[in-house]
Image (cartoon, rainbow, N blue to C red):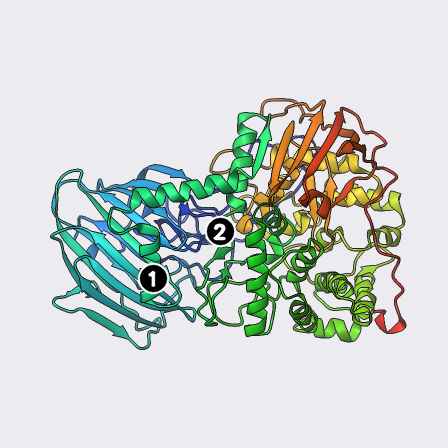
Amino acid sequence: MGTAATDLPRPRGLAATWWWPKPQVGNTHPGATSPLGMVSACAYSGAYPTGYGRYAKNTEGVPEEMFDRLQASGFTHFQQSGTGAIRKYYNYVRVTPMLEPLDALGQAWPLHDEVATAGYYAATLDTGVRCEITVGEKVAVHRYTFPEHRNARVVIDLSCGGLDIEIGRTVPLRAQAESMGHGRAQGTVVMEGVPLSVYLEVDSPGWRQMLWYDRRLIDGGTRLDFDSIRHTTLRPFGMLFMGPVAAGQTVEVRLGFSLRGCDQARQNLERECWLAQPGFDEVHAATRVRWAQHVDRVQVDGGTPARRTVMATALYHSLIKPCFADDESPFWPTSGPYAFDICTMWDIYKTQLPLLAAIVPHRASDLLESLIRVCEEEGNFPIGYRMARGADRFFRQASALAHTALADAHALGRPGVDWSWALAHMVDDLRRLYGEDFFEHGLVHPISHTLDLAYAYHCTAQVARALNDQRLADDLDRRSRQWVNAFDPATGLLRDSEFYEGGKWNYSFRLLHDMASRIALAGGDTAFVDKLDRFFGFGAAPVVQPGRRPPLTEMAAGYALHRFEGLNNEPDMEAPWAYHYAGRPDRTAQVVKSALTWQFGTGPGGLPGNDDSGGLSSWYVWASLGLFPVAGQSLFLINTPAFERAAIRVGDEEFVIETTGHRETPIGVDGVDAEPAPQYVQSATFNGEPLHTTHLNAADVHRGGRLHLRLGPRPSGWGCESRPPSLPAPRASPKENP
């Protein structure tokens, strides 16, 4: 699901009015992964952006095909998940089973009979070699079943990296490789300033093994060293194992990875592969158990088979990233968690991070500890963080996003964080990059950064106040109210500015910490709802989505609609819940129902856009449960769930959402005249007591409990009067005015 261009039934009703300018492709891959593990492995074609598949680089509309078939030149390790133009794309240590001479390395063969399950990937190359891959947390195991051949080969290419697209190639800076005899070898390549080490064993008795360089064997050579490599001087290099095989004979390749040298890579392999016996089945079984333990933390009852499939896959995609490499940081010597592939923090901080905090809280705490250490070592909380070194911090996208997760964790009393030290970094980070202008003027362009920074000040103020630093908290709180400077009182929308992947309408309906004042600024409930209705297309005519290579005129006309971009753009993910703050939870129910119905499907084209490291899939999980986390405010908003009953294992507790009067509806309901009518909450109880508000404190959810929702076919008065909490109205000083 999500590995191919978007292919969903033509929407009807409200969803038909939404316009999606960003790439219409999920950009996921079907390779083997372990829950939040360090290593992934997948067939490698060189296509954008995961290295798997058929598509060329694209930033809007339907992706163009780079290849006319599914193909692979081998199998690589470390992939992005659902990202777009992330700029660096991994795909390191390519393993290729071959029947041809070494000169054919890099040739791509068609893929047949693909199979993908959690922790497992298999396909057959056109050469007749059946290829299976599984991974552990820090290891990968390949199993190749060959046809009869007198000189089969398994080739390890240490020079591989990136994609076969313009500026997509990643070239090692330095490298060394060593053949150790008896089916063993090791090597280190420095990619993007990170030393990636691999220790490997090939279970192929009687085969020869050699090093190679520039597709030529180095007979008798046991070591290669490269002190400096440039794009212009790069020649492929690696290891080769070759010998005769009988029909159906299997060869197993076991690889341990580390960011701290070959010795630790060997130890990682020994720890997970039990080298006294073949490792594939054991590693696969252990990873399958880990996946079951993670995915089983969310259980749903009811729902059509298709909806249950989408839900399970969304939960799976939500648990692939970030990657945790415990005790593996190449940048500081101490033990502890090291997390990377937090590549799209601006997508995941309001959906995926709260999901991790709920169902894998120990890993959420590990992530925060790692982010604090990154800030300590590099000077900033990262906006995006890859397995790389350098200043590529994605600062254009957003500012100070880690503060939301830190504030939520502190409010929940999460252990394992030195909060005084965390607060020091939170405060310092507020004044870096765009934060300097915000501190001086109370306003910064791009204007969305004004909202980011004001919200981060609010989050930091909550931590400071809880730590009894009242003077600091008061100052932070005062500056947090400068969000008002970003808005034009004449329009009730954001001021004109440049925007990253969106426009002022997309960003104007974010869930701020003072939504009561935000709504008043727009002219009150009625005026605010009118603007939301226009944004979501109520009463508007259907639109046509961009196709391949959409012309500039078509894109300009689409942007001029100022329309909700469905779930194709991350700024829009929280906007449906803005209705809650204006006393219209019925509108939230309508929008979310349309999105769940029309924007997700079960096939390879089942996502409306980039999954963004699990940010989109996490949205689906929360929306299906009838909850939405307001990150940074320790708050959940309540909406109609997609399932009759659901249970979330939150730490050691269970939070249950159950319904009365729930009606099942399919997804992608093609062949009907209208979309299924939404259902609305008529009344609610929490732990048996009447609940008149449309929200719950996050602590109540994390403590476990039972939320019961009575549903009906028409809007009710439930939640119309009692609004989610907001701060007092801001009082801007003259200096803070734009």
Q: What residue appears at the point 84 percent right and 56 percent down from the top-left corner?
A: 727
Q: In the displayed structure, would residue 24 be above or below residue 686? A: below
Number of residues whose C-alpha sits closer than 10 Å to that of mark 1, classed few (under 14), some (14–19) or many (20 or more)? many
Helix, strand or loop at label 2? It is loop
Quadrant including the C terminus: bottom right
Residue 241 in the image: x percent, y percent? Answer: 18, 56
Residue under label 1: 265
Q: Amino acid at mark 1?
A: Ala
Residue under label 2: 36
Residue 556 in the image: x percent, y percent? Answer: 65, 51
- Residue 6 in view, yes or no: no
Helix, strand or loop at label 1? It is helix
Nearer to the camera, 506 or 220: 220
Q: Is residue 295 left or right of residue 255?
A: right
How much space separates mark 2 and mark 1, taking CA atoms? Answer: 18 Å
Q: What residue appears at the point 57 percent right and 63 percent down from the top-left corner?
A: 369
Q: Quadrant of residue 12?
A: top right
Nearer to the camera, 677 or 21: 677
Q: Amino acid at mark 2?
A: Leu
Mark sitting earlier along the chain (2/1): 2
Residue 262 in the image: x percent, y percent? Answer: 32, 66
Q: Is residue 624 left or right of residue 81?
A: right
Nearer to the camera, 276 or 481: 276
Q: In the displayed structure, would residue 255 be above or below residue 28? A: below
- Residue 721 in view, yes or no: yes
Q: Residue furthest bottom?
A: 227
Residue 443 in the image: x percent, y percent? Answer: 77, 68
The label on residue 64 is: none
Q: Is residue 331 left or right of residue 395?
A: left
